[in-house]
Image: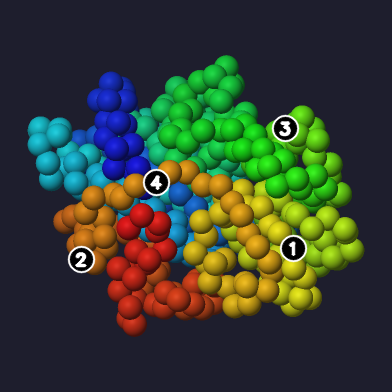
Amino acid sequence: MFLQAFYRLLIGILILAGSGSACEYSPGRCGAWADGDIWIGVLNSCHSKVQTLHVRERPEKYNCTELNLLSLVRTLAVVHTIETINNSSFLPGVRLGYYICDTCSDASKAIQSTEQLLAVNGTLPVQCEVLERPNVKAIIGARFSEDSLAVARLLSLYMVAQISTTSSAQTLSDRVRYPSFLRTIPSDVHQTKALANFMKHFHWNWVGVVYGDDDYGKNALQSFLAESEGADICHAFKEALPHYLAHNEIDKRIQEVAEIISLSKAKVVLLILKEELVSKLFKEMIRQNISRTWIASDAWSMSRNISRMEGINQVGAIFGFTFITGPNPGFKEFLQQLTLAPGSVNLFLEEYKHCNETDCPGERDFPPWKIYPIASLVKMVPGL
């Protein structure tokens, strides 16, 4: 991963940013924090979904479920990098703190978490009294483009720097609408061009596409359709799956898409989906004994969970694109020892210690803390 160099690059933005004020931490909204002279806000999808979102009728607490262990490891990578900087002479006389909030893979929850970070920053007014007020100078995240787009609109009002390492939607490159958004990966326009050229090289000119109905899926689909037209690639079908994992008809929709794939003569299918949706679709493919050639978008091309699914070899060949990554020096050792700085709190880690197959579905290779330490999660991250 290139997280180490990325967070060091972020320091320049932090030093130049203004100061602010806020309420003290509210445990019901965010899950990890540590004191510092300068605070970094972090948005990450530590949980995969929000329960009962489709029946929500009034403002109430979001019930986030299904702890995402890969996101947990990414969160710990942020903590490790910040602590590495604090223990060096890189910022003499200045200590970095952090404030990590969960988006729960939902755009509305991401906005709520962003408001909490802006309150810490003093940008939004708060109704409480505190004696010492920490300052959030920049926000890292979110993981999904759907969440980053919603957050970027809000942060652009106040010109608070937002930097994502994973959100690739092309529209986020619009400097007029998202002037304070930055990212460390290219937009989907490059990925979809590569996908079209890849298919053209193998003379796959009759393909199907399954995409998520979120901003990432829709934007990537339109970009791919434009590129494939120039590559003389035709589309047998274009089917959408709901981005919201707790959608009450998601299983029915998975079965419908599986039937469309089964009946189609297209032998190549592009999946512009997040990992959890691909897993659900592949389980149905395995159940129905359907085999195709699958093209993976960057959102799931390096998924360890999918590569280890029972029966995955039955679905056919899988090709995908991903980004060049490198090691995060010292991170493996950090996970093996996992000693957080004095005064820091990480409720996500506490949840992991007590999670089981119900709380952490699909993570059977990484059982609870009491059986194996968090260091076992290092196997989930390429490059470590």
Q: Which mark is residue 227?
A: 3
The answer to whether marks 3 and 4 mark residues whose Cβ atoms lie closer than 8 Å is no
> Distance from label 1 to label 4 (Cα)?
29 Å
> Distance from label 3 to label 1 (Cα)?
22 Å
Frontmost of labels 4 and 2 is 4
Instruction: Judge left or right: residue 250 versus residue 193.
Output: right
Image coordinates of residue 383 in percent, x first then y, are: 36, 54
Q: Which mark is residue 292?
A: 1
Frontmost of labels 1 and 4 is 1
- Residue displayed at 57% across by 66% down: 306
Image coordinates of residue 246 in percent, x first then y, are: 67, 62
Q: Is residue 59 visible?
A: no
> Distance from label 3 to label 2 (Cα)?
47 Å
SS of the residue at dot 4? Answer: loop
Which of 291 and 352 lies nearest the eye of the viewer?
291
Which residue is tagged 4?
A: 325
Amino acid, disc 1: Arg
Which callout, 1 or 4, points at the residue further toward the start of the chain? 1
> Distance from label 4 to label 2 (Cα)?
24 Å
Which callout, 3 or 2, points at the residue further toward the start of the chain? 3
Q: Badge 2 local density, few (<14 within 10 Å), some, or many (20+)? A: few
